Amino acid sequence: MRKLEHYISAGGKRLRCGYTTGTCAAAATRAAAELLLGGVTVPSVVVSTPAGIEVVVDVEESDRGDTWATCAVRKDAGDDPDITDGILVYAKVEVSAAADIVIEGGVGVGRVTKPGLDQGVGAAAINSVPRAMIEAAARGAAEAHRYTGGLTVTISVPDGVELAQRTFNPRLGVEGGISVLGTSGIVRPMSEEALMSSIRLELKVLRASGVRDLVLVPGNYGHDYATEVLGLDEGHLVSCSNYLGVAIDEAALLGFETLLLVGHIGKLAKVAGGAMNMHSRVADGRAETMATHAALAGATAKDVALIMEAPTTDAMLDILAASGLLEAAMATLTERLEDNVARRAANRLQAEVVVFSRQRGLLGASRGAAELMERHRMAGGESR
């Protein structure tokens, strides 16, 4: 199997990246569509990922009938300890009477059973970005062979049924298999030691450049909201991944004067519950935290129970909004979030918080957050 030769440096180590199940599904789709429409078995395909990196993926299995073709590629997770590393991802492409490209899930791809996830109830658990990649792969082959009819693409992961039992999928409301995921198409290695060292190094470099006011975000959602919605200076921003406690400690040690944490409710609900490492293997408690603040706002026992059963924080927010308690619940949650972050900072620096959701925007901000946000907006090219 061809390996992805793309590396990142983290914690003084050179780590090899891999590609997501979404990239695998797109690659298998392109290969199967080429076999169906062109009649040629291709040894490998090129996939353009949302990260801007082109990957060459080997095709391991191929088969063809009169109106269908199927191909498989093997997942390469690089140096990331991903349980899906090495599995085969299949795509079956069939001629369809429909006028468009239809994407379905086969064996080993889960089905959504609860509202609030990326896909609706009953749909295959193939998220939006992988769906777009799969559609682009099928459409690219159709255009190359001047085919104008419809195609049905079915993604299957035979090992997915067993693997799903080792994930949070059943609890989240995805049954029968794994989810086909990936927002960038590329898997960045998640060595805990290397990630924490990388965070410390990035903070050290930023502080050495003269920056005294820091913006921390847990990941891509926080980064995009901080820069694109709030208009904060990207030059003052550091991603702490799941390691908020480590980042706060290091920021205080390095002498940063202020810290503004900007994060999605899905991550920061954990912090409001007391977690300083937000990785799902270490802590969750989102439902318990959201249910507690719903109850403080006056939610009924029925609504509290619904929140405890909801698969995502977005679904929990929907329940709060429907009961008219969203604002009150987010106010007390934000207060607890602020208290927990300030307690970790231990008066070593001023710490403020902003919490949001992608669907509802700003959900809460601590008392001093507005002042810090304005400071970061004004900073521009300054080194404050």
Image (tube, rainbow, N blue to C red):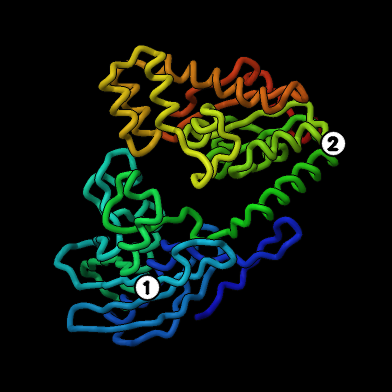
Q: Residues within 10 Å of mark 1 (few under 14, many from 20)?
A: many
* Image marks 1 and 2: residues in contact by CB distance under 8 Å: no
Image point (54%, 58%), residue name: 51
Image point (66%, 64%), residue name: 15
Above or below — where is 72 with respect to 326?
below
Residue highlighted by disc 2: 210
Residue highlighted by disc 1: 28
Percent x, y for residue 37?
A: 28, 80
Image point (34%, 22%), residue name: 320
Looking at numbered disc 1 in the image, what kind of residue is underneath it? Ala
Q: Where's the C terminus, which quadrant? A: top right
Locate residue 268 relative to residue 173 in the image: left or right: right
Secondary element type, mark 1: helix
Above or below — where is 270 with respect to 295?
below
Give whichever of 55, 291 is nearer the camera. 291
Give whichever of 49, 168 is nearer the camera. 168
Looking at numbered disc 2 in the image, what kind of residue is underneath it? Gly
Residue farthest to the bottom, as pictured: 40
- CA distance separating discs 1 and 2: 49 Å
Percent x, y for residue 262?
A: 59, 32
Secondary element type, mark 2: loop
Percent x, y for residue 351?
A: 68, 24
Above or below — where is 233 with respect to 341?
below
**Picture quadrant where residue 256 is located:** top right
The label on residue 381 is none
Image point (57%, 26%), residue name: 354
Q: Residues within 10 Å of mark 2 (few under 14, many from 20)?
A: few
Locate residue 181 relative to residue 123 in the image: left or right: right
